Image (cartoon, grey):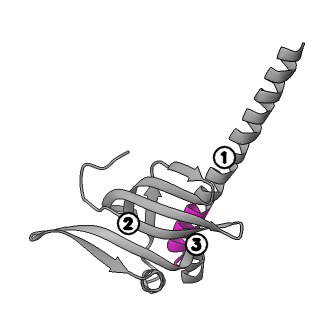
């Protein structure tokens, strides 16, 4: 009888832990999706709200002289998206989410394909680092790759 009770308690604790971890992963995913929804809507405020105040944005660029890392601020990114002409539709389609959470830190790996007016532009992978501030997940760092072929699906 004691063994069954102990097993039941362990099972309940495992389910509770897994449920908590799953809900944190979903909360991280929601922040990332909200940022891309803001990009599709050309809503600078929605984009900015997904990031921490001092977030870093970088992109890996392959140039003739070699690999370089491009930088821009969240405000620069958000304002450039908001200034895209109304007739231009930007759509970054995430093909997968791999999210890991430990306490107030999370990482997300999101392969993507980018379309402009439904025409394929490029693909790559986003690597996000997020921190939970006062109960709210914020993106603190993002770096991405960009290429025209060999897309991850």
Farthest residue to the right: give it. Answer: 1
Q: Secondary structure at mark 3?
A: loop
Q: Secondary structure at mark 2?
A: strand
Region in magenta? 31-42
Q: Is residue 33 magenta?
A: yes
The residue to which callout 1 is attached is 21
Residue 136: image location, x then y, percent:
68, 67
Label 3 vs label 2: CA separation? 15 Å
Dot 3 and dot 2 residues touching (CB under 8 Å): no
Residue 69: image location, x then y, percent:
26, 72
Q: Is residue 2 above or below residue 56?
A: above
Discs 2/1, front: 1
Discs 1/3, front: 1
- 83 vs 125, nearest the viewer: 125
- Looking at the image, residue 123 sits to the left or right of residue 100; the answer is left
The residue to which callout 3 is attached is 50
The residue to which callout 2 is attached is 143
- 146 vs 87, nearest the viewer: 146
Which residue is at 32% across, 69% downward? 59
Closer to the chain start, of discs 2 and 1, is 1
Residue 64: image location, x then y, percent:
9, 69
> Which image quadrant: the C terminus?
top left
């Amino acid at each position: 009888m004691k063994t069954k009770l102990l097993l039941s308690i362990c099972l309940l604790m495992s389910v509770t832990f897994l449920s908590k971890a799953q809900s944190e992963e979903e909360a991280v995913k929601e922040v990332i999706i909200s940022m891309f929804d803001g990009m599709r809507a050309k809503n600078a405020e929605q984009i900015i709200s997904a990031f921490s105040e001092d977030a870093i944005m970088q992109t890996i660029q392959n140039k003739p002289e070699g690999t370089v890392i491009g930088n821009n601020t969240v405000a620069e990114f958000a304002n450039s998206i908001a200034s895209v002409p109304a007739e231009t539709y930007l759509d970054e389609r995430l093909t997968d989410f791999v999210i890991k959470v430990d306490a107030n830190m999370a990482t997300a790996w999101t392969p993507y394909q980018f379309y402009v007016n439904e025409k394929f532009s490029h693909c790559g992978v986003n690597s996000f680092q997020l921190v939970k501030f006062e109960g709210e997940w914020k993106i603190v760092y993002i770096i991405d790759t960009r290429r025209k072929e060999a897309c991850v699906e």
